[in-house]
Image: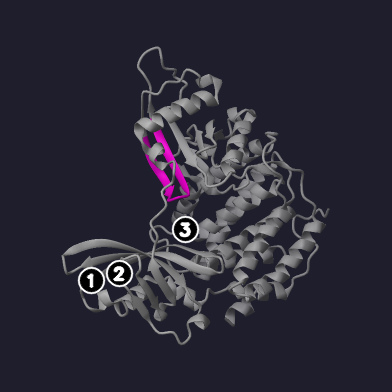
Amino acid sequence: MPNSKKLTHVRPDSAIWEGLQSYASLPAWVITATDPLRVIHAMDHGIPEFTSGNKILRNCDIHHVRYKDGKWSGTYKLEVEDKTNGTKGVEVRLLGTFLPPDQIRGRKMEVTGRLGEDSWYGFLPEVNLEFQKLEPEKVLAALSLLTDPEGSRQLLEKSIRAGSPRYANLHIEACTPKVVRYKPGSRCTVVYQLEYPQGNSSDPSWPNLVVAKTYRNEKGVNAYQSMRAVWESPLGTSKEVAVAEPLAYLPDMRVLVQGPIREQQTLKEMVRSAVCTRSKESIEEMFSFMRKTAAGVVALHTSRVQSGLTWTWENELAVVQEQVDNLAASIPALKVGTEPLINQLVALALAYPPDHLVPSHGSFRPAQVLISDGKIGFIDFDSFCQSEPALDLALFLGNVKSIGLTAFEEDEEAPVLDRPEQEARLELLENACRVFLDEYETSLPVSHQRISLWETLDLLTIVIHSWTKVKPVRLQNTLFLLEQHLRRNGLVEYAETTRENK
């Protein structure tokens, strides 16, 4: 293996960056369908209830835009005022499906039924959208029990007792649930404040705060088994990083119950704050916690925990290729545009063999690092696996840079950063990444070439997700990151000419 830390088995290939230009701009018709002002204008001039003046459209919030099964769709929440009865703030929820121009050419605007009724339908060619009433949100089967104070008290007491001998005598006097995250019909996270009996019947080691997480698939099993293995390893008592104690897993409900990790902020929030303020104090604080996080990752990677499946770079590449293929079903040029990069990466993966497998978090990002009283904790072991160190390291480093370039003090939808600001932020973020990696390598050697290969896939994934979720600002910032990453590794030359000609 070459001694250089860069990818040396490569020559700059203009076809790589030229191909990636197919991702440079989202289709105009997709952008139009996600512009609230354009949608409001089309509805005001196309839906009879609004054109007649009987109802007034006050606002339109667009959420959950996703590309699935060969098409984009989103949830459109309308705030409607009904002048006929003086009702204000009535919410009408519609499902909007984006239609490509070649599918609607020649079609005229069409609206049938009464707005808000199940049979209502609308087609507004001005914004390339087909609307129908959104089906009621599915109710998570376990939600009523998880949020009922007495029902959840009994459930937690029984499951925690059965989950560990140390809690065999646990008795919960009262339970106060608080939903902190909820996706209807899919996921829910509930935090419980527990109260115990006064006197000798309670144990000071019993947790006063526990968390219940639901899963839509079998990832909860992997999370619980992995957390149990981590908790019983040296990592469970590590001074470098805190991990949550797994208390129980309820397979019938797909619910994981775990102990708490204290949180004042996440590392993601700290990075964003440092990038926005750029004060000496905030930067030094960020660097300090980068070192602490690196020490925590070393503790994880050396824990010898044997849990989870093996996940390779080839597995990751297959996932990325599937995402490209799915998107190319609508935009064929995207697959062609990715091929030169993918082909080069495959060749490089053969030239630079992976490091030995280690216990790996699997989805390690700054958002998974909790900070409290100067200490850190790691959460979300759903994707725990056995992999080379570069899996965790590359994903973390790429996301540090990505979130730093999309950090704004107030407006998440602020315009794309200009080039000087992008470069200034990236310099700071790369310094933070260097601090992290230097600290990691004081304890463990790692192949920088493998990190580069994994990070290329991670950045390409963010580019793809910027398309599937219609995030034009994130797209431009990530393309800038990807270009700089490829240029630094010798895969492309500086693309100034390409940019000037755009």
Query: Residue 195 versus residue 183: which sits nearer the camera?
Result: 183
Q: Residue at x 47, y 54 (%)?
A: 278
Say whether disc 1 or disc 3 marks the residue closer to the N-terminus.
1
Q: Residue at x 67, y 34 (%)?
A: 303
Could you say which quadrant of the image residue 443 lies in? top right
Residue 367 seen by the camera? yes
The amino acid pointed to by label 2 is Leu
The part of the chain drawn in magenta is 177-193
Query: Residue 441 versus residue 36: which sits nearer the camera?
Result: 36
The amino acid pointed to by label 1 is Lys
Q: Residue at x 41, y 80 (%)?
A: 125
Q: Main secondary structure of the magenta part?
A: strand
- Disc 1 to disc 2: CB gap under 8 Å: yes
Give the x, y percent position of residue 197. 36, 18
Q: Nearer the viewer, mark 1 or mark 2?
A: 2
The amino acid pointed to by label 3 is Ala
- Please name the residue that numbered disc 3 is placed on: 407
Give the x, y percent position of residue 363. 60, 48
Q: Quadrant of the C terminus?
A: bottom right
Determine whether 464 is above or below 433 in the image.
Answer: below
Q: Residue furthest left?
A: 85
**Left/right of residue 287 with respect to residue 50 in the rendered view:** right
**Circle 3: element type:** loop
Q: Residue at x 64, y 28 (%)?
A: 234
- Please name the residue that numbered disc 1 is placed on: 55
Could you say which quadrant of the image residue 398 lies in? bottom right
Determine whether 128 is above or below 205 in the image.
Answer: below
Whether residue 192 is in magenta: the answer is yes
- Please name the residue that numbered disc 2 is placed on: 115
